[in-house]
Amino acid sequence: MADAFSVQFVRGIDANRTLKDELTAVIRSQSSRRRISVTDLVNPRQAFFRWTRPEIQPSPERAHFMMAGTGFHDLFGRAVATEEFVEQFVEYEGVVGKIDIYDKIPVELKTTGSNPDAPGAARPSYIDQLGLYCTMTGVSSGWLLIYRREQFGRQPILRAFRVEFTNPDPLRAEMLRRRDIFRDALERGDPADLPRCEWFGRNCDYSDVCHCDVATPLAHIVAQDAYRIERDTNLEATLTSQLSAPGERPRGFRLNDLVFPRKAAYEHQPADEESEPDTAVETRLRELERQGFRGTLYKALRFGIPGAFKNQPVKLRSLSDRVGMFHDMPTLMRVTKFREMVERDRLPQAMGHYFDRLVFECALAGAERGRLVLYYEILPGDKFMVYQVSLKNMPAVLAEAERRLALLESGASPAELPACPSWMAKFCRYKDRCGCGDAA
């Protein structure tokens, strides 16, 4: 494989352990809780220990799973709904909740590794949570969306179910009862009256302290005969259409257009009426999941340490973008599926597109050093590495940015621009004509 453009400009790479520990602490930290939530009532015994034992942290694998789900929820909601309906905060009788999408009825999205077509896909806890949201909003039905993640080579799947709650009064009474016993447990510092949670015997983070083995078995909030559920293929079709709809053609240029200029050239060409856009909903779901996890990490980096992060605007003629500055240095955060950590001297060759982005960011921000925060999502245990990268000959980097941008602005043939990494070709909508897969 040909070396990435950036290889010749890397002077040296150091692993920054101090910053790594700082960021790891931020990402693993949990905000203090002040109000009882719907999720607390679904599994109150586990929630008790989340409140009272904040030093017990999830494993890196579980933390990754939760962060990926959080980011996916956010992006999915904004892909199929507008801002006024996404992540709606609700409050009822001292209990608070955040509904994924709430227009006329609540819509709750769940991510899972299981088959969403199986009879038990709609877990009782999913029904309980949706039932509480319906009670809090005064409606009798809601939608449950179940998304199976892309894992082990399987395609992502999205399924929609309409759930109707036939007897809301017992549900409301149970919500208030759980609120009271949970509040009492917190005040006394004793979870003895709280029922066993659904994660008993399933690698719960609190298994060493929770004593679920002697707790009262968990009774679900919504009785099995108190709701009806059926798959809603019409809603699935609507969501698929929204997720598959091609976006607007880009206006102006961004930093990534310098990193993948051949793809950018195709994206800025006039629409070809005979071409078929890439509308596979699986592709869109996969993209949302990947972006969602990175977005959650980015928020931790941006907001976790007050005053440490800022977005610096950069501009080069028709190119306008922002560079993330952490402690006044361009800092790029990325997620990789590499199955083993790459030796730092090989990083520019192994992850050339990350380094191309970093050197262009540094050139436009007027910096000769940058950071790459790398998260190995597949590796067990310690997943973070923070690299401090020293660069050289930055005028030449800026000159190459000028050259690539000038070709894009002139509408030059994509063949005149550097190819994207060959591995990208199989995922690209232009793979039938871009030639990048043969560039290696």
Image (tube, rainbow, N blue to C red):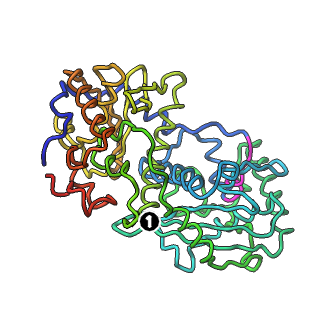
Residue 336 locus on image (x, y percent): 32, 47
In the picture provided, is 215 more to the left or to the right than 424? right
- Does the segment drawn in magenta span residue 40? yes
The secondary element bearing badge 1 is classed as loop
Q: Residue at x 34, y 25 (%)?
A: 364
Within 10 Å of disc 1 (Cα), the crowding (few <14, some 14-19, many 20+) is some
Image quarter of residue 317: top left
Can you say whether 10 is above or below 271 in the image?
Answer: above
Image quarter of residue 407: top left
Q: Amino acid at mark 1?
A: Thr
Can you say whether 89 is above or below 32 in the image?
Answer: below
Residue 40 locus on image (x, y percent): 68, 52
In the picture provided, is 203 more to the left or to the right than 276? right
Q: Residue at x 23, y 22 (%)?
A: 394
Magenta region, mostly helix, strand or loop?
helix
- In this view, the residue in front, 33 or 402, is 402
What residue is shown with label 1?
A: 279
Residue 269 locus on image (x, y percent): 36, 51
- Does the segment drawn in magenta span residue 25? no
The total number of labels drawn is: 1
- In this view, the residue in front, 373 or 41, is 373
Residue 152 locus on image (x, y percent): 34, 66
- In this view, the residue in front, 192 or 234, is 234
Can you say whether 331 is above or below 96 in the image?
Answer: above
Residue interval drawn in magenta: 35-42
